[in-house]
Every structure is written in C-alpha cells, then in structure tokens.
Amino acid sequence: MAKEKLTKEQEQLARFAKALGHPIRIAILQMLAKQTCCYHGDMSEILPVAKSTLSQHLKELKEAGLIQGTITLPSVKYCIHKENWALAKQLFDGLLVEAGMSEECQ
Amino acid sequence: MAKEKLTKEQEQLARFAKALGHPIRIAILQMLAKQTCCYHGDMSEILPVAKSTLSQHLKELKEAGLIQGTITLPSVKYCIHKENWALAKQLFDGLLVEAGMSEECQ
DNA sequence: AATATTGTTCGTATATTTACGAACAATATT
DNA sequence: AATATTGTTCGTAAATATACGAACAATATT
C-alpha cells in the first residue's frame, strides 16, 4: 500500500471548508459580505444564538483566517479577511470546477 | 432581540461545507474528479487511512449527497453526484463571489 | 464446501464541536 | 466610585467526529 501523504493544499481547503461547515458561520459571512453589518452586537441581535456562542463562532472563523476583527470601542467590528478569502475562493473554485467537469462514471 | 431563523440555503451550504471539511474527503473528491480512480479499493491503497475509516468518509460524502456509489462486484465504484455537485458549486460560488466583492471594512 | 476478495458494520476510545449561562475585563457614563 | 455597555473567557454538559481493528456479509474462486 503506497499511502500518499495529504498535501498542504488539501489541508488548507479542508480547513476553510470546516470553518464554513456551520449554518451560523455561513450567516455571519453573508452578513459581512453584504456589509449590512459588521458589529458583533448587531449580529448578536439577529442570529439565534447566545452571545457567548456567537463569540465562539467568530473565533473559529478568525482562526481559520476567513475574517478579522478590530476593536472599535465600545464595540468590535468584524470583516472578511480579503487575502485569505481570495485564497479560499481559488481553492474552492479549483475543486468545484474540476469535479464538475468529470466524466460520467458509468 | 429579533432572532432570525436560518434559511434552508444556509443549512444546505453548511452541510456541503461540512462534508468538505476533512482533508481525506477533499482527496477523495479530487480523485473522483480526475477520474483517476473510482473504486474504493484503489482509494484505499492511496489514502493514508484504514479501509474502515475510508468507508466512513465515503458514507459521509454520500449522506451529504456529494457522491454516489454503485456496487460493481467484486468492487464498489464511486462517482461525483453531478446534480448535487452543481448545486454545491452554485451555493459556494454565491457566497464566495458575494464576500469577495464586499467593501473594505475600515 | 472451503477459501479468497472486497467493503461495510460493530465496538470502542479519544478528541472536537456546539451550546449555554455565569463570571470577568475594559472602557464609558452617571 | 458606582453603574452600564460590550464582548470574551470559563466551566460544563451533551452531541459529533475521527480512527482503528475485528467481525461480518456477499459474492467469486478453487
């Protein structure tokens, strides 16, 4: 068995995907994308989770590199991490296109 | 607090993303995409996991609707689930483009 | 009928994820 | 100095995810 090691790219893509793997985090990213709201407080009012839970989700997105937060007292402003987002887009696109073009398997 | 319910779309996108959220599953999809291999056995030889673990990953991808498997004795052939894959692509694209165009938040 | 091949399922252990409220920290306001 | 506002961190509980080998199932081969 010639077990192949997984590549950094595969790990990175999985990391991004994992961060997207929760509906609350999707909702967060959509809000940030639309710029309808960037503040923790605003999201907290809309999203159906406790503020502590929201903090956890934001932390995960931050750790995955998809968003960044800056303290703007008395609130905290979040936004998309443009650079990493571009990388994510590139990686996802690569996979999605590739697989979309695959032959019918039958 | 006007807590909004999450949409089916958000749930679906998160479901897909979650399925992509493991490097082994990324590797599986890439192999299926490239058509270099469609058989469980072939993947089992290449991917660095026990066959039982591979089965679990394949099951998750199947349950998420991203792949489908057909028994072709003595082996099992897997392939991308074209229809759902197209949906996944659409949903991911939507999010990725949207967020990519968001204003600089500063 | 015994054996081999190919995957799945089972049993199990460990780690991670998710969620909540309470407590805390940092600053602003009274 | 007490109070209010805004988020994070802590403690905790419950659910999922991940991994492995052993056992099993289904068919093919001897």
Image (cartoon, coloured by chain):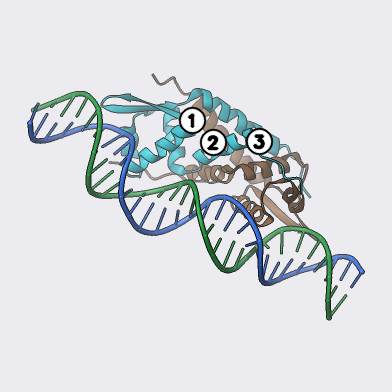
Chain colours: A cyan, B brown, C green, D blue
Q: Kindly identify the amino acid type of the residue bearing the numbered disc 2.
A: Phe
Q: Kindly identify the amino acid type of the residue bearing the numbered disc 1.
A: Gly
The tag earlier along the polypeptide, 2 or 1, is 2
What is the number of the mark on residue B68?
none
Q: Which residue is mark 2?
A: A16
Numbered disc 1: secondary structure: loop
Q: CA distance from mark 2 to mark 1?
A: 8 Å
Q: Chain of mark 3?
A: A
Query: Looking at the image, which residue is at 72% across and 51% down?
Result: B44
In the image, C17 versus B93, the foreground residue is C17
Q: Chain of mark 2?
A: A
Percent from the top left, x then y, of residue B58? 65, 52
Q: CA distance from mark 3 to mark 1?
A: 19 Å
Disc 1: CA contacts within 10 A as few (<14), some (14-19) or many (>=20): some
Query: Looking at the image, which residue is at 53% across and 26% down?
Result: A84
Query: Is the Cβ of the residue at disc 2 closer than 8 Å to that at disc 1?
Result: yes
Numbered disc 2: secondary structure: helix
The tag earlier along the polypeptide, 3 or 1, is 3
Query: Looking at the image, which residue is at 66% across and 35% down?
Result: A7
Tell which tag, 2 or 3, sits nearer the viewer: 3
Percent from the top left, x then y, of residue D11? 30, 50
Residue A5 can be seen, yes or no: yes
Query: Looking at the image, which residue is at 52% across and 27% down?
Result: A85
The tag earlier along the polypeptide, 2 or 3, is 3
Name the quadrant containing residue A72.
top left
Q: Which residue is mark 1?
A: A65
